[in-house]
Image (tube, grey):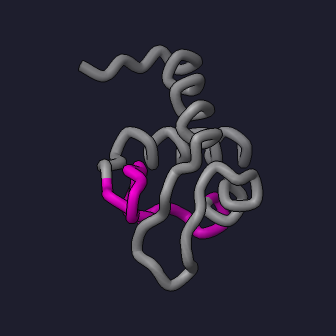
Amino acid sequence: MKDQIDELTLLLLYLTSFKDDEGPFEVLRSWKGYPFESLDELKEARCIVGSNRAKSVVLTEDGEKQARELMEKYHIKVE
């Protein structure tokens, strides 16, 4: 069950993300109002990055890719 919670947390981070300018780069940022244990797991898996003190995280390229794959897995389409 824990793996599914981590998957769905990543998916929710992706679906609720917004574009943010981080210096010369544009990144996807999301507020981290999700279980800290799942956020820690996603950070260890290098799907997200960010400070523990910040209120948001940045999705990595790998995190974005995995989230798009999860959208297909769970048959989610964004219009």
Q: Quadrant of the C terminus?
A: top left
Give the residues drawn in magenta, as a range: 20-38
Report the residue at 67% width, 60% height from top. 43
- Left or right of 35 in this view: 32: left
Residue sticking out furthest to the left = 79
Q: Position of residue 11 (x, y in %)?
A: 50, 39
Residue 36 forms part of the magenta stretch: yes
Report the residue at 59% width, 69% height from top. 36
Q: Nearer the viewer, residue 46 or 40?
A: 46
- Left or right of 35 in this view: 21: left
Q: Position of residue 31 (x, y in %)?
A: 38, 62
Q: Quadrant of the N terminus?
A: top right
Q: Nearer the viewer, residue 62 or 67?
A: 62
Q: Position of residue 12 (x, y in %)?
A: 44, 44
Residue sticking out furthest to the bottom = 53
Residue 58 forms part of the magenta stretch: no
Q: Quadrant of residue 56?
A: bottom left
Q: Is residue 35 above or below residue 19?
A: below
- Left or right of 78 in this view: 74: right
Q: Nearer the viewer, residue 4 or 16?
A: 16
Q: Position of residue 72 (x, y in %)?
A: 53, 16
Tally of numbered discs: 0
Report the residue at 38% width, 50% height from top. 26
Report the residue at 36% width, 48% height from top. 17
Q: Nearer the viewer, residue 8 or 13?
A: 13
